[in-house]
Amino acid sequence: MKHSITRTLLSAAAAAALCCSLSINTVQALAEELAPPAVSYDDSELGDFIVRLAGDAVLAAPEASGQGADYIDTDAAQSAEDRLRSAQDMVAKHIRSLYPEFEIKRRFTLTANGFSCRLPESIIPDIEADPLVEEVSPVRTDFMSEPQLATARELGGITDFCNNTDCTGEGEVIAVIDTEFDVTHDMFAAMEGKEARITKDDVFAISRKAGFSSKLSSDKVYLSNKVPFAYDYSDDTPYTLNDNSRYHGTHVSGIAAGNRFTTSDGKEI
C-alpha cells in the first residue's frame, strides 16, 4: 500500500511538472521527500540490475534514422545525451537516498536510456515509484546453449551461399554482444600475415574521440588482429572467461567469424 500511495503521489508530481512547467529538479525533490529512509544492507541482499528510464534513447530520434551512426557526432545528439545523463543523475541521487553506497556501473544513452547497477532488491518498488523510472530489471546471467559448430555451416546453408555468391565475409569487421566468449579458443587466434582492419591505435583513437560508457583503455580491450575489441560489460577488468559451461557467445562468434582449425582428433572445423 505504501508503494502504491507513493507512486500515485509521484505520478501526480510528474503530471504537475508537465502542466505547470515545473523543472525536473522539482519532480526529483518530491521523489526524495517521499522516499523512505536509507537502510544498510549486506552483500547477500544485493543483486545486479538495469534501471530503465522514461524518455527515448539518442538514436531513437527521427533524424537518426536518416543519418545512421553519423548522427552520434551531431550537436543534437550530444544535447540529447546530456539530457539523458542529467535525468540518470537525478535517479541515481534518489537511489542513493535509499542506499548510500549506490554507484552507477554503466550508462546507456545511444540505443537505450538507463544504467546498470548493483542494489538491494527490496528497494526496487521505491525506485520504480520515481516518475523518471520506467522499470528495474534483474541482469540475466544464466542463459545457456549447446554448441554445434561442426555442423553449423551446413545447417545454416553458409557453404552454398558462399559458393553461389562469392561473398565470404573475408576482411569484414563485425560486432557480437553475447554471453561468455572464450578468447583463447583456436578459432580466434591471431591471423598471421594479414593486415589488421582495426589496430590497437585505432581502438585508442576511438576511445579518445567517442569515449566509452565506463573506464577502460585499449590495453584492456585489444587482444589481436583477430579480436581487436573484447570487453566484459559487467565490470571494468580485462576480459576473461568466467564460466566454461556458458559458451553461447563463443558459439555465435565462431559461426560468424571463427578461423578454421583442426581438433586433437584430426577433425577440421
Image (spheres, rainbow, N blue to C red):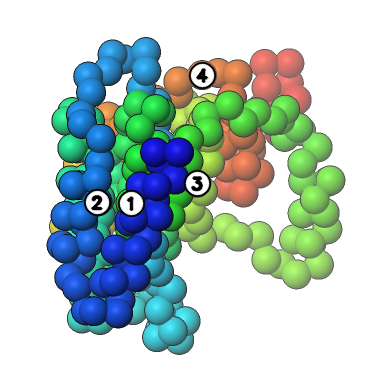
Quadrant in which the N terminus is drawn:
top left
* Disc 1 versus disc 3: nearer the observer: 1
Residue 252 pos. (x, y %):
62, 42
Element at label 3: loop
Q: Are marks 2 and 4 in contact (CB under 8 Å)?
A: no
Q: Nearer the viewer, mark 3 or mark 2?
A: 2
Say which amino acid is labelled 4: Asp
- Determine which residue is flagged by label 2: 31
Q: Which type of secondary structure does the marked residue at label 1 adopt?
A: loop
Say which mark, if any, is on residue 89.
none
Q: State the residue in front, 37 or 165.
A: 37
Q: Name the residue under label 1.
A: 130
Image quadrant where residue 190 sits: top left
Residue at (71, 67) in percent of width and height: 166
Q: Which residue is drawn at 50% across and 46% down?
A: 177
Residue sitting nearer the eye, 252 or 23: 23
Please tell me in which quadrant of the rendered image residue 80 appears.
bottom left
Calculate the distance from the C-alpha at mark 3 to the C-alpha at mark 2. Answer: 35 Å
Indicate whether 81 appears above or below 146.
below
Disc 3: which residue: 177
